């Protein structure tokens, strides 16, 4: 995974933190909210961000970005959170001067991390309706955006510091980009969405196959005949685009839930 920041500018201690976090993320269901919240908390701690937000981003005609918050954390009170969420829900009332510049910087297949001052200078930022109406009310000022544009769409998050705190530095921005590049594949929820799109019966079949049970044992657990199970497995392989159990585990092992309860949910 490429990144627009220079890995050579990172200190050895920072590189160790990047590797450690990437290793930690392998222990979570890939692309799950719990995994992404853990990621946000760790990245936020690395650069001293008080608020972290995982963003959903869509580009709509004529090339305008529409942003919504998938989940966020770190707010000191609900009123401050509400202030910024109002902006995310109604951007037309106050455009964020950083968004257009961030859009221009994006490159397909690469992580792009930018601090606010790289996207909008102080005069533009503090004079904007966005800052006066939303950021000030939320008690937030400086920020870093990091975005990956890939085949699965946008993968983007933002980190924020309170008013009157020092702005993010270039090394901190480089660190965020390096962390995102190293962890992007683990945060990808494409496989998770495919698995979650299966019927409860197929998800349960997938669960027992992943546990290492034989076809006869899986049929017993599901209380179906071997012939019926064979049909489930054929359908499962076709839906997941695999031809063997080994390929299934190699591609989907990180996103197969480990509890029967979750698999049985609609």
Image (cartoon, rainbow, N blue to C red):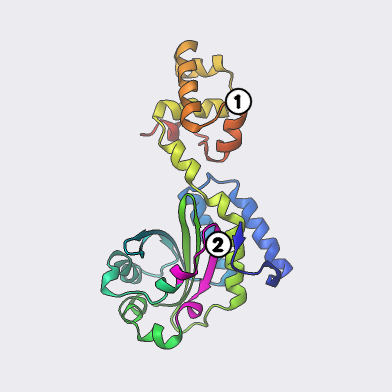
Q: Is residue 119 above or below residue 218?
A: below
Mark on residue 109?
none
**Outermost residue, right direction?**
12
Q: Residue at x 53, y 56 (%)?
A: 38
What is the magenta range?
Answer: 102-120
Q: Tag 2's secondary structure?
A: strand
109 is within the stretch colored magenta = yes
Give percent across and percent down for residue 133: 30, 79
- Crowdedness of circle 2 by 10 Å Cα count: few (<14), some, many (20+)? many
**Outermost residue, bottom direction?**
123
Residue 100 horizontal side relative to residue 177, left or right: left
- The residue under label 2 is 111
Give percent across and percent down for residue 196: 43, 38
Residue 82 horizontal side relative to residue 262, left or right: left
- The residue under label 1 is 212
Q: Is residue 19 above or below residue 83?
A: above
Quarter of the picture holding the N terminus = bottom right
């Amino acid at each position: 995974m490429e990144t627009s920041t220079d890995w050579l500018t990172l200190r050895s201690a920072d590189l160790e933190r990047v590797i450690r976090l990437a290793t930690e993320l392998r222990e979570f269901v890939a692309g799950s909210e719990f995994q992404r919240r853990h990621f946000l908390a760790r990245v936020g701690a690395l650069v001293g961000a008080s608020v972290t937000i995982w963003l959903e981003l869509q580009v709509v005609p004529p090339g305008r970005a529409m942003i919504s918050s998938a989940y966020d954390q770190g707010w000191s009170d609900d009123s401050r959170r509400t202030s910024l969420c109002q902006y995310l829900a109604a951007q037309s009332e106050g455009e964020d001067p950083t968004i257009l510049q961030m859009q221009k910087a994006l490159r397909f297949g690469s992580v792009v991390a930018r601090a606010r001052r790289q996207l909008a200078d102080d005069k533009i930022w503090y004079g904007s309706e966005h800052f006066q109406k939303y950021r000030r009310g939320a008690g937030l000022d400086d920020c870093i955006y990091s975005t990956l544009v890939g085949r699965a769409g946008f993968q983007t998050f933002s980190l924020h510091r309170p008013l009157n705190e020092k702005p993010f530095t270039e090394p901190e921005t480089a660190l965020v980009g390096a962390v995102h590049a190293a962890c992007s594949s683990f945060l990808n929820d494409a496989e998770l969405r495919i698995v979650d799109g299966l019927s409860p019966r197929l998800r349960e079949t997938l669960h027992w196959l992943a546990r290492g049970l034989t076809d006869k044992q899986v049929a017993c657990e599901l209380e179906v005949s071997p012939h019926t199970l064979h049909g489930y497995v054929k359908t499962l392989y076709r839906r997941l685009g695999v031809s063997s159990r080994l390929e299934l585990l190699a591609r989907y092992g990180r996103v197969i839930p480990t509890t029967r309860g979750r698999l049985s949910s609609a």
